[in-house]
């Protein structure tokens, strides 16, 4: 027993020591660069949101993150940005996640001040197939959400509805049904939760007016 | 100073090996995945090259320091652990200071972990040589890899967009060859450059 322990220590001490050194190196690097990486992510999110809410001059995160349920059922904490122009509330922006063809799709979504209409969405990260799924970044698909009611969306095939009509019916991208569904599913899953949380916090009204 | 059997200094031999005799991409055909994937423009190619140099130098130093304690059955495990740690550091650094480039390179920076050039140098050089020789070897191999990437990226960016480093170098009348920015352009350029290098090598020998 003692011999086998001794042999194990002789054979593996270097691996254990190297793991410790590498682990410490990674922890130190992550601690040093983590805040800057987070800041970069926030900057990207707010710069994309600024295109969706062009009126906004400033995006301020709410002091406390909002608890929402992810697509997999787990609780997630999400940061919601308050978009203002000269101290006047013009909208809200937050990140939603969909399950795409290749990987997760992260979208920045913006709604108006009363959470009645969607200002639109933009893609933060996506690994969808170029020429097919990545058309969720294109205006053809994105413009269907701009100005649509911030409520449940229904995805239909091409020809079943007019993509230029702004309502809760979204026409799927031909050849990219999974990616189209991922966007609609993400909206349907997260929008009601964000709306409810903001209403509970008294940040938006319960009716049609804020 | 240590010398090879043919009287050449080990440092000179390491430099010649990395930059010409065994230049990873053109002679050994190693690391071809990033070579084809990130050479549509010169900036990502250069960034990838610098990341590989950083990982090569750091992993060679660490493997060289551990070489006397290496056991055959945990050797590859140790190499992979070391390489993965330094690739993660390079990836975090890019995400912190070059977020746009990190996004443009996508999964190819984390994929340096499985780049054969690095594990090849750890096995062939660092595990059998001193720290200084291992550093020179890493710099030479990394420079060879970066030069190869930059050669392909220069050709592809100029023909694909008419620009280099985003500066117009061809007359605006030149019709940009969009295919050069696509995988087909990568394979064609790589093939032609390989053919040219083989032709020059045969002529010289």
Image (cartoon, coloured by chain):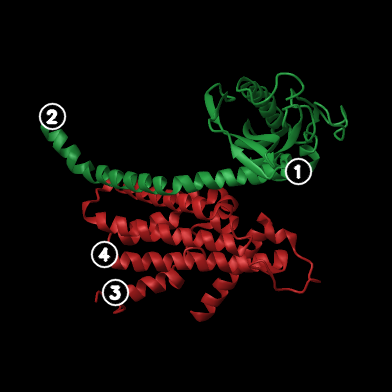
Chain colours: A green, B red
Image depth: mark 4 or mark 2 in front: 4
x and y, in percent, of residue A109 in the image:
68, 35
Quick check: marks 4 and 2 in contact, CB under 8 Å?
no
Q: In the visual, does A24 lie left or right of A205?
A: left
**Marks 1, 3: nearer the viewer:** 1
Separation (CA) of disc 2 from disc 3: 47 Å
Circle 3 chain: B
List x then y, in percent, for residue B150: 56, 67
Is disc 3 on the same chain as disc 2? Answer: no
> Based on the displayed image, in which of its 4 quarters is residue A126 positioned?
top right
Say which mark, if any, is on residue A1.
Answer: 2
Q: Secondary structure at mark 3?
A: loop
Can residue B167 be seen by looking at this rendering? Answer: yes
Residue B135 sits above or below residue A154 on the image = below
Residue B4 — which label? 3
Describe the element under mark 2 as helix, strand or loop.
loop
Q: Residues within 10 Å of mark 3 (few under 14, many from 20)?
A: few
Nearer the observer: mark 4 or 1; the answer is 1
Provide the residue designation for mark 4. Answer: B130
């Amino acid at each position: 027993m003692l011999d086998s322990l001794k042999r194990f220590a002789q054979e593996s001490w270097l691996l254990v020591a190297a793991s410790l050194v590498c682990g410490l190196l990674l922890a130190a690097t992550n601690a040093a660069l983590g805040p800057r990486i987070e800041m970069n992510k926030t900057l990207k999110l707010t710069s994309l949101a600024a295109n969706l809410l062009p009126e906004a001059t400033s995006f301020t995160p709410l002091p406390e993150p909002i608890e929402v349920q992810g697509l997999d059922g787990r609780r997630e904490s999400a940061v919601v940005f308050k978009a203002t122009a000269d101290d006047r509330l013009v909208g809200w922006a937050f990140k939603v996640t969909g399950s795409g063809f290749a990987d997760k799709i992260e979208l920045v979504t913006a709604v108006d001040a009363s959470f009645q209409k969607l200002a639109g969405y933009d893609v933060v990260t996506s690994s969808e197939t170029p020429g097919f799924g990545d058309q969720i970044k294109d205006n053809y698909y994105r413009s269907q959400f701009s100005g649509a009611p911030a409520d449940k969306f229904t995805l239909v095939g091409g020809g079943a509805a007019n993509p230029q009509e702004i309502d809760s019916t979204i026409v799927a991208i031909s050849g990219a049904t999974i990616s189209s569904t991922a966007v609609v599913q993400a909206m349907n899953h997260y929008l009601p939760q964000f709306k409810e949380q903001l209403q509970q916090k008294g940040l938006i009204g319960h009716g049609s007016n804020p | 100073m240590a010398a090879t059997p043919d009287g050449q200094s080990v440092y000179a031999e390491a430099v010649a090996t990395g930059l010409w005799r065994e230049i990873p991409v053109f002679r050994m055909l190693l690391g071809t995945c990033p070579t084809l994937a990130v050479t549509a423009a010169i900036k990502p190619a250069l960034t990838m090259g610098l990341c590989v140099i950083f990982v090569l130098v750091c992993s060679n130093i660490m493997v060289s320091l551990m070489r006397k304690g290496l056991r055959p059955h945990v050797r590859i495990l140790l190499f992979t652990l070391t390489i993965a740690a330094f690739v993660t550091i390079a990836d975090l650094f890019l995400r912190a200071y070059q977020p746009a480039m990190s996004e443009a390179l996508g999964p190819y920076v984390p994929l340096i972990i499985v780049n054969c050039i690095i594990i090849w140098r750890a096995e062939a050089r660092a595990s059998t040589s001193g720290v200084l020789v291992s550093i020179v070897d890493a710099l030479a191999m990394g420079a060879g890899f970066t030069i190869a990437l930059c050669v392909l990226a220069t050709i592809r960016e100029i023909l694909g967009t008419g620009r280099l480093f985003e500066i117009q170098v061809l007359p605006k009348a030149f019709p940009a060859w969009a295919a050069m920015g696509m995988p087909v352009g990568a394979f064609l350029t790589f093939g032609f450059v390989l053919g040219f290098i083989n032709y020059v090598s045969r002529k010289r020998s």
